Image (cartoon, helix red, strand yellow):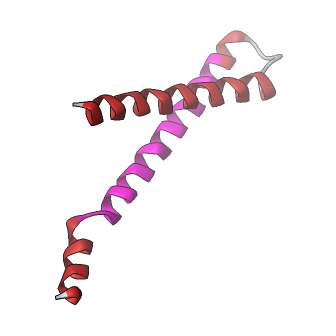
Amino acid sequence: MASNTKRELLTGAHYLLIGFIALCAVFRWFGSRPLMLQLLAWSAIAVTLSLLRFIILFFSDWMRRDQWQTIQRRYWK
């Protein structure tokens, strides 16, 4: 249960960081634009970073599959 809570807290921290990065980018490059354009830019940046996070998680999970471990264990026997 502790690892599940830890995972949830880390996931929340990831999304908070994504939102903060998107907000900083909007203030930096879209600060003088209308509010609707700022919201659109923030949404686009946040969605892009979230998709990038999912891609990274997918590839890291793919590299840690049991297939790689079983091949390695065969050589040790």
Q: Main secondary structure of the magenta part?
A: helix
Residue in the image at 78% along x and 17% along y: 33
Task: Answer with left or right where residue 65 lies relative to residue 63.
Answer: left
Whether residue 48 is situated above or below residue 70 in the rendered picture: above
Magenta-tinted stretch: 39-65
x%, y% of residue 65? 25, 64
Q: Is residue 51 magenta?
A: yes
Q: Residue at x 20, y 80 (%)?
A: 73
Of residues 57 and 28, the one drawn nearer to the viewer in this rendering: 57
Q: Is residue 62 magenta?
A: yes
Q: Is residue 23 left or right of residue 55?
A: right
The location of residue 9, given as percent across then percent down, is 40, 28
Q: Is residue 59 left or right of residue 28?
A: left
Name the residue at 31% across, 63% down. Answer: 64
Q: Is residue 21 left or right of residue 56?
A: right
The residue lying furthest to the top in this view is 35
Viewer-proximal residue among 46 and 59: 59
Q: Position of residue 38 (x, y in %)?
A: 68, 18
